[in-house]
Image (tube, rainbow, N blue to C red):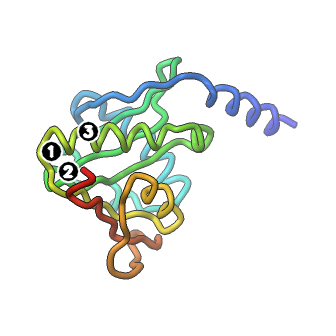
Amino acid sequence: MLAAAYNAAMSKSASNAFSVQRVSWHQRRDDLVYVRRRVFIDEQGVPEELEWDAEDENADHALAISSDGNPIGTGRLKPDCYVGRMAVLEPWRGHGVGGSILEKLLAIARERGCTAVRLHAQTHALGFYARFGFVPEGEEFEEAGIPHWLMELRPSSV
């Protein structure tokens, strides 16, 4: 019964407004770490040593924040125009948070003059990225024990 009440409350909060901000690792490290730890390490079982890398300091990050000020999603764009570390807390999935994060990262890519944007998509998320024009390339591969595909947004689409 308690779990049902918690899920109902979380579903209600997920319908509230949110915003997506461009942030740096140094500005909002704790919020970025919180979301990625919950999604990748706790939920998906990614080993801690594979989650954190030096790329974070040089990447532009998009941070989704609920109307009550809590971090709910994140993604990053590395200097080489690779999108990565896209994560949305479970109660907020299906409410446009991931799409808003990706749109923010693609806007940053356009601003930077990226001629193509690539990413490693978890296989279950291929349809999500395809809606934004990403096309799978090559064959499925494993990364951190999770099936992925390389996907690219063609130059005319960035």
Q: Residue 58 carries which label?
A: 1
According to the image, label 3 marks what residue? 107
Residue at screen point 40% across, 63% down: 121
x and y percentages locating residue 35 in the rendered image: 45, 41
Q: Residues within 10 Å of mark 1 (few under 14, many from 20)?
A: some
Residue at screen point 16% across, 38% down: 111
> Mark 1 falls on what kind of element?
helix
x and y percentages locating residue 8 in the rendered image: 76, 32
Q: Report the front residue among 132 and 120.
A: 132
Q: Earlier in the sequence, mark 2 or mark 3?
A: 2
Q: In this view, does 11 lie above or below 68?
A: below
In the drawing, does residue 115 fall left or right of residue 62? left
Q: Residue furthest right?
A: 1
x and y percentages locating residue 15 in the rendered image: 63, 28
In the drawing, does residue 81 fall left or right of residue 10? left
Which label sits in the foreground, 3 or 1? 3
Q: Which of marks 3 and 1 is nearer the N terminus?
A: 1
Name the quadrant containing residue 105: top left
Label 3 to label 1: alpha-carbon separation = 17 Å
Q: In this view, does 57 lie above or below 28?
A: below
Amino acid found under the numbered disc labelled 3: Ala
> Mark 2 falls on what kind of element?
loop
Amino acid found under the numbered disc labelled 1: Asn
> Mark 3 falls on what kind of element?
helix
Find out whether the residues at labels 2 and 1 contact each other: C-beta distance under 8 Å. Answer: yes
Q: Residue 78 carries which label?
A: 2
